[in-house]
Image: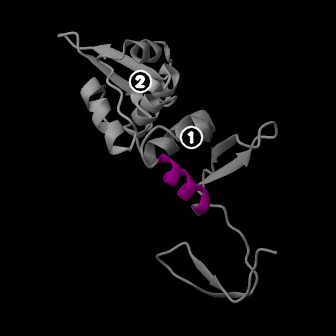
Amino acid sequence: LAAKSRTAQERMVDVVDALKRAVGRSALSAAQVMEVMFELGYEAVDLSTDSEVDSKLQANEKIERTLDEEGVAYYAYKSAYGEVVDAASLMRAMERDGFVKAKDVVDCYADAASDIEAMIVSGEVIATQNAGSHNEVSLFPRRGRYLVRVSGDVASADEDSSAVRVTRDVRD
């Protein structure tokens, strides 16, 4: 589909997704947005000429649009936790607030989803599915080690790893 045959809403959604994926970078000019969109396989949108999409972005609370001293527009995606830029700052935010909703932090930086998964698997955080919405997950800092007694089926454990080898499936 040509860019002009798509609606302004469709084009804006692609731009927002590209800005979301470029999180962690500084604000992007219209030309840089086009480059990121091209790299991601999107049909590029030229925000310097597409005033309809530019207006929609200005109205979008998740997008920050600033002008430099020469009047050139720059665009950036605003996550709910702007201070979260890596796993350590994610953990600090959880400890400060008591918990965070995964949907509010998954778009804070490029590897946030994999860091969240690693924190859940390692036991650093407890993930709970909210009763009202099966898609909404809250993350709670564990605040200390969580020890679990494993039956006598442990074959070996590595000192430098959190992995344990067992002789049978102990999940039942």
Q: Main secondary structure of the magenta part?
A: helix
- Give the residue type at disc 1: Glu
- Residue 120 appears in view: yes
Mark 1 lies on residue: 95
- Relative image position of residue 156 (x, y in whole percent): 59, 87
- Give the residue type at disc 2: Lys
Figure quadrant of residue 85? top left
- Relative image position of residue 86 (x, y in whole percent): 42, 45
Left/right of residue 57 with respect to residue 135 in the rendered view: left
> Does residue 8 belong to the magenta stretch?
no
Disc 2: CA contacts within 10 A as few (<14), some (14-19) or many (>=20) = few
Mark 1 and mark 2: Cα distance apart in space: 47 Å
User: By what rule are the colours in the image chosen?
Assistant: one colour
Stretch of the chain drawn in magenta = 112-121
Q: Under tag 1, what secondary structure?
A: helix
Q: Which mark is residue 55?
A: none
